[in-house]
Image (cartoon, rainbow, N blue to C red):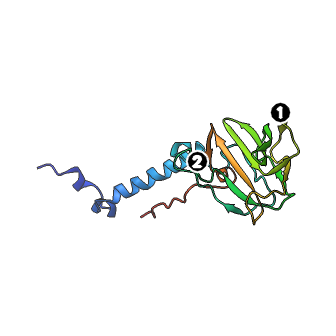
Amino acid sequence: MVPDDAALAPYSPASRSPLGHRSRAFTILVALCLLLGAALGGGALGLQPALAAGGWTWPVKPKPAVTRTFQPPAEKWLSGRRGVDLGAAPGTEVRSPAAGTVTFAGVVVDRPVITVDHGGGLKSSFEPIEASVKRGDSVARGQVIGNIASAGHCPPANCVHWGVRRDGEYVNPLQFVQDMRPSVLLPVPE
């Protein structure tokens, strides 16, 4: 009788555990996926890295408090928060978070608004903001585009509303200035 190959293999704890080899293989697979995701900018895993849009910066300095978060509606026509409110007093300078071209600087309903097209389908909008730029102006990352108007967007607090659209769909602006990826815990090697 010819012995089984497994019987000739040297002893290892993993060979006695039905999950030993699978656990190590899983750990290696997860590590490779994370490395591949990082190398591809997060796209392979569907993640948005913090600086996905080419190094955006906060539109208000110093880094402001987020007084209201992004809460998109379930359907386009429903109410919801299509941007974030950043705590800042009237008169505070507002800066373009990335290079682009001003596509709108005017009043919408009763609030002064500025929109900057950053290219690649990305547009930022700010309100209420008294513009120091006009339609057609090119702006650099961090360039002052206006000041928060005294007509408050979020009384009784003071803030500026920042919205970002990607190909016409509102997305969370914070993903461009901070790391929004979830934490991933890896298994402990045996």
Give how far across and how far down residue 46 sits, in percent. Answer: 53, 45
Give how far across and how far down residue 186 sits, in percent. Answer: 48, 60
Instruction: Say which residue appears at 84% left-offset and 59% top-offset.
Output: 90
The answer to which of 18 and 1 lies nearer the viewer is 18
Which type of secondary structure does the marked residue at label 2 adopt? helix
Which type of secondary structure does the marked residue at label 1 adopt? loop
Image marks 2 and 1: residues in contact by CB distance under 8 Å: no
How crowded pointer 1 is (Cα within 10 Å; few <14, some 14-19, many 20+) is rated as some
The answer to which of 62 and 166 lies nearer the viewer is 166
**Residue type at tag 2:** Ala
Instruction: Say which residue appears at 72% left-offset and 44% top-offset.
Output: 124
Q: Is residue 171 left or right of residue 86?
A: left
Among the two numbered marks 2 and 1 on one chain, the one whose residue lies closer to the N terminus? 2
Report the Cα–Cα distance between label 2 and label 1.
36 Å
User: What is the number of the mark on residue 136?
Assistant: 1
Instruction: Say which residue appears at 72% left-offset and 51% top-offset.
Output: 162
The residue identified by callout 2 is 38
**Residue type at tag 1:** Gly
Depth check, mark 2 against mark 1: the one in front is 1
The answer to which of 91 and 95 lies nearer the viewer is 91
Q: Is residue 85 left or right of residue 74?
A: right
Give how far across and how far down residue 1 sits, in percent. Answer: 11, 50
Vertical placement of 103 versus 46: above or below? above
User: What is the number of the mark on residue 6?
Assistant: none
Q: Among all residues in the image, which is located at the extreme left?
A: 1
